[in-house]
Image (spheres, rainbow, N blue to C red):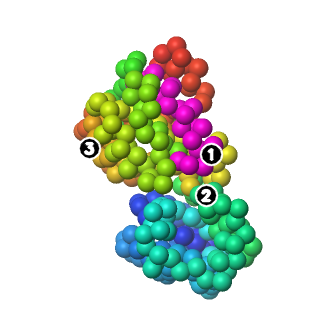
Amino acid sequence: MGGAIGLIAGQGRLPLELARSARRQGRSVVAVGLEELASPELAGLADVHVPLFLGELGRLFQAFREHGADEVVLAGKVPKSFLWERRDAVRPDAVALRALAELPDRADDSLLGAVVEALEAEGLRVLGQAELAPDLLATRGCLGRHVLDDAQWADVRFGYPIAKALGGVDVGQTVVVKDRAVLALEAIEGTDAAIARGCALGEPGATVVKVAKPSQDPRMDVPAIGADTVRALAAGGGAVLAVEAGATLVIEREEAIAEADRAGIRVLGVDAADLADLAAGAPS
């Protein structure tokens, strides 16, 4: 990698983290901030900042060509609800309309896949988010100072394959469980809202499990957590946040783990290899 990196920025803190990572690597950042979604902080981190409305693919291609960015990374949320509720901020041009017309459905993978294909058709290489910032990936084991009890390990083992199955049908990546019962499955509302809904349905002490899709494309929709995720769990009285190690991004890790430690929340990275260990107790 080298030279300018193009950054297509949606909602949340991840685009800021990736911009900082690129700058630390000595790369200039050409950021396209999606109107009504991207953080205003992005302009201060980018060498070039171009605000565009969602769907303006032609202008997006032009911005990257003009400023020498031949590698691109997608980061940040574009909530499905935004597509329905803020139609004034979604302005598909002719390029986008052609891509949409060819889609079999409007699932996340289909929509994001169309964007990736359009970028690559323009000669742009789309990077995986972790390829640009591998230090953001969750590691295996407890990430904070609090550890799980046997019942919480059982909930992690119960919830992990359910979350994988949910991701396999491209609906969501998060499940909320308690005492080996499902309280909520993530759908269009997103992770934090699913956490709030699940925690409201059960007694305090829920476990949240978030994983990558079985056929996860590392260039798009990679699962991510951060301090806001921890706060949502704390507000609902949740106890555990388990994510897939090596496949989930932890944004602003120090702040997120500090929030978890203060709230008594257990945060850990777990992978498929841990499941056999969990059958006999906590993994080593």
Q: Is residue 177 above or below residue 29?
A: above
Whole-percent x, y for residue 239 in the image: 33, 32
Q: Is residue 124 above or below residue 281?
A: below
Verify whether residue 168 appears in magenta: yes
| Residue picked out by circle 2 | 107
> Dot 1: within a 10 Å radius of its alpha carbon, few (fewer than 14), some, or many (20 or more) residues?
few
SS at mark 3? helix
Q: Which mark is residue 169?
A: 1
Q: Which mark is residue 235?
A: 3
Whole-percent x, y for residue 150 in the image: 40, 18
Q: Earlier in the sequence, mark 1 or mark 3?
A: 1
- Which segment did they paint magenta? 152-172
- Which residue is located at x 27 percent, y 36 percent? 237
Whole-percent x, y for residue 73 in the image: 59, 65
Q: Earlier in the sequence, mark 2 or mark 3?
A: 2
Give the foreground label among 2 and 3.
2
- Which residue is located at x 29 percent, y 30 percent? 203
Q: Is residue 81 visible?
A: yes
Instruction: Looking at the picture, tell me which residue is in the foreground, 105 or 91.
Output: 105
